[in-house]
Image: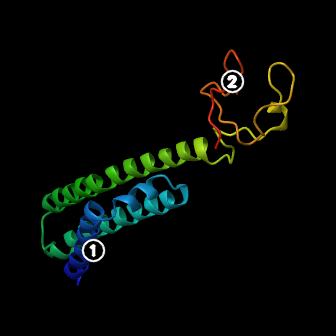
Amino acid sequence: MLGAVVLVVFVVLAAGGVWLATGGRRTALRTAVDTDQLLWVVGGVGLLALLWAAVVVAGFRMLLPRRISRGRRALGALVVTVLVAAVVVPAVWAGQLLLTQRELIAGVFDDGDSATVDDSPTRSATRSGSTSCCSAGTVARTARGAHRHGDRGQHRHRHR
């Protein structure tokens, strides 16, 4: 029974890997920048690590003979502990990286403000105090965030 479960999980993961390598790249990139989907990926990584650890422990328990010395039992438990740690530590590390990426994306992009369009009415006047040549909301901002014109009133920004 345990072998069938492991085989099914392995086949599903292998098929998912083939799909990601061939046709699922766009989906993977969208997932990597979507804060809600990143939470699901963290949960999936955690669940997969938990199931893998359960398979290691269950396999050890099933293969353990009834009569075994304490030393061999302790050695087997040590090997199982190392194997579980080899699964759980990278999964925790991956989860931390995914959550860090989620926080970064949320901090940079989820504020609802545009980084290139100034919608405020106070920016509608030029340096001379006259009305702007551009309507608010259509002005592209420079790297410093200012709406700039050239020496003779020429535009240095693009209209959308």
Disc ID at residue 12: 1
Indicate left or right for 30 with 120 as reference. left
The residue labelled by disc 2 is: 148
Within 10 Å of disc 1 (Cα), the crowding (few <14, some 14-19, many 20+) is: few
Residue drawn at the location 21% of the way across and 82% of the way down = 4
Residue drawn at the location 33% of the way across and 50% of the way down = 89
Residue 62: % across, % down: 19, 76
Task: Kindly indicate the quadrant of the structure image that contains residue 12.
Answer: bottom left
Residue drawn at the location 29% of the way across and 53% of the way down = 85
Task: Return the residue nearer the eye: 44 or 114.
Answer: 114
Indicate left or right for 117 with 98 as reference. right
Locate the N terminus and report the quarter of the image it occupies: bottom left
Task: Return the residue nearer the eye: 111 or 86.
Answer: 111
Residue kind at label 1, given as amino acid type: Val
The alpha-carbon separation of the residues under discs 1 and 2 comes to 55 Å
Local SS, label 1: helix
Disc ID at residue 34: none
